[in-house]
């Protein structure tokens, strides 16, 4: 059996995606090991979840740095020292600089709570509702120099319901994030993910679920 993929997770808040990755590592469905969890905010849930799982934690507070690059250099140093092979952003609310991406080329991934390329950035659940979109979802993608612009690995779709608030929609989307993020990491751990420009290919191929979703239903 090959060695587990060494992951560094960056988080800013509650860390439910981190927890999903921890759980899948623990139940053996993810051949990876989280070697370090770094947050940019002190006292957040992600730190507690990692500590409880016996994972090394560190808070590097971005407010202690005058320039984004200096903050990123500090992150990179710790991640390199920990011999991380993949960096997973899990609710990490800082834009990472080219300095960071250059240190881990093609090895930084993110989960975003919308169906990219629709609704990049922040407060995207409210934006999807305000726009009148019928569906939203989540996207796991490689991180490039832009904001939520990198090649897409996997997406999951959820309906937007008439009485949704940003919170109810966020909860519905999060449920899917917890499934697809560990799945994307497992595909990478298995060496099945190839990137060519914007195209991400899974080898051997993994067919999509061929179900059309319609909202509102055509049956009603
Ligand atoms: C998740 O919905 C994640 O997609 C989002 O923050 C939430 C973090 O939840 N990330 C972004 O918006 C990144 N721009 P969590 O801390 O419970 O995993």
Image (cartoon, rainbow, N blue to C red):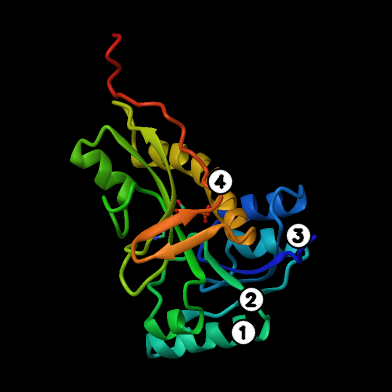
> Cα distance, mark 4 to mark 2?
22 Å
Q: Which mark is residue 178?
A: 4
Dot placed on the residue nearer the N-terminal end, 1 or 3: 3
**What residue is shown at x 38% (from left), y 82% (from top)?**
98
Name the outermost residue toward the left.
131
Label 1 CB-ligand 1 distance < 8 A: no
The residue tagged 3 is 53
Q: Are marks 2 and 1 in contact (CB under 8 Å)?
A: yes
Q: Residue at x 50, y 84 (%)?
A: 103
125 relative position to 12: left or right: left
Q: Residues within 10 Å of mark 1 (few under 14, many from 20)?
A: few
Q: Are marks 4 and 3 in contact (CB under 8 Å)?
A: no
Which residue is nearer to you in this view: 191 or 104? 191
The one of 165 and 37 positioned closer to us in this rendering: 37
| Foreground disc of the pair 1, 3 | 1
The image shows residue 204 at horizontal and vertical percentages of 56, 49
**Residue occupying the far front of the picture:** 204
Question: Depth check: 191 or 219 in front?
Answer: 191
Q: Which residue is mark 2?
A: 84
The alpha-carbon separation of the residues under discs 1 and 4 comes to: 26 Å
Query: Is mark 1 in CB contact (under 8 Å) with mark 3?
Result: no
Mark 3 secondary-structure assignment: loop
Question: Which of pointers 2 and 3 lies earlier in the amino acid sequence?
Answer: 3
Between marks 1 and 4 in the image, the one whose residue lies nearer the viewer: 1
Nearest to N terminus: mark 1 or mark 4: 1
Q: Secondary structure at mark 4?
A: helix
Tell me the residue that label 1 is attached to: 80
Where residue 5 appears, x then y in whole percent?
A: 68, 66
Residue drawn 48% across and 62% down?
A: 194
């Amino acid at each position: 059996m090959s060695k587990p993929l060494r992951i560094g997770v960056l988080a800013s808040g509650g860390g439910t995606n981190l927890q999903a990755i921890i759980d899948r590592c623990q139940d053996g469905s993810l051949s990876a090991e989280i070697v370090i969890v770094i947050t940019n905010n002190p006292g957040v849930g992600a730190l507690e979840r990692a500590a409880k799982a016996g994972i090394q934690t560190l808070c590097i507070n971005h407010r202690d740095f005058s320039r984004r690059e200096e903050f990123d250099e500090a992150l990179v140093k710790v991640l390199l020292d920990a011999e991380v092979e993949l960096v997973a952003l899990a609710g990490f609310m800082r834009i990472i600089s080219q300095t960071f991406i250059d240190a881990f080329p093609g090895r930084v991934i993110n989960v975003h709570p919308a169906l990219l390329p629709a609704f990049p950035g922040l407060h995207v659940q409210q934006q999807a509702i305000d726009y009148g979109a019928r569906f939203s979802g989540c996207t796991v993608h490689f991180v490039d120099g832009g904001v939520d612009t990198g090649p897409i690995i996997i997406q999951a779709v959820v309906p937007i319901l008439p009485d949704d608030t940003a919170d109810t929609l966020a909860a519905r989307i999060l449920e899917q994030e917890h499934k697809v993020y560990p799945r994307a990491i497992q595909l990478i751990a298995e060496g099945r993910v190839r990137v060519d420009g914007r195209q991400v290919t899974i080898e051997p191929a993994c067919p999509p679920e061929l179900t059309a979703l319609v909202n509102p239903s055509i049956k009603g």
